[in-house]
Amino acid sequence: MFRPGVSGQAAEDRAAAYLETRGLEIRARNVRRPYGELDLVAQEGDTLVLVEVRKRSHPGFGGGAESIDRRKQARLLRVAEAYLQERAWNGPVRFDVMTLDGRDRIDWLQDAIQAPTD
């Protein structure tokens, strides 16, 4: 039986474990604000890494990275801005996307989302 959120939580768990094996420290999970959520917040050296995790169980649904449209990116950037202000973070920040397919293969796209420049 399909239960929404269960596979998403499992995907976030796999993504967090994957990052930890590569030396990143998970600092927060599921940072929620009224306008969105950051799945994972990690730190790699002096860089704060904000991570969006996407799970696609079937290739017919399209890739996980492609599902992050402009509106989703804008929401993620808004949550990120609020989180960074709350923490008074002044160091480098990177926004990554991690996708998992139906076989839980991970694709880690570093610096995948960037704030628009004026």
Image: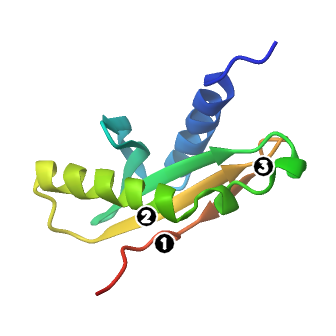
Instruction: Decide which of tag 3 and tag 1 comes sooner along the chain.
Output: 3
Q: CA distance from mark 3 to mark 1?
A: 19 Å
- Give me the residue at 87% from left, 43% from top: 58
Density class for disc 1 (Cα within 10 Å; few <14, some 14-19, many ≥20) is some
Which element is circle 3 on? loop
Q: Position of residue 27 (x, y in %)?
A: 32, 42
Around disc 2, counting alpha carbons within 10 Å, would you say few (fewer than 14), some (14 to 19), or many (20 or more)? many
In terms of secondary structure, where does tag 1 sit?
loop
Q: Nearer the viewer, residue 71 or 90?
A: 71
The residue that mark 1 highlights is: 111
Left or right side of 104 for 60: right
Mark 1 to mark 2 CA distance (whole Å): 5 Å
Which residue position is annotated with label 3? 105
- Res 82 label: none
Circle 2 sits in a helix, a strand or a loop, which is it?
strand
Q: Residue furthest bottom?
A: 118
Judge whether 33 appears above or below 92 on screen.
above
Q: Are marks 2 and 3 in contact (CB under 8 Å)?
A: no
Please state which amino acid type lies under the numbered disc 1.
Asp
Above or below residue 39? Residue 97 is: below
Q: Are marks 1 and 2 in contact (CB under 8 Å)?
A: yes
Q: CA distance from mark 2 to mark 3?
A: 20 Å
Residue linked to disc 2: 95
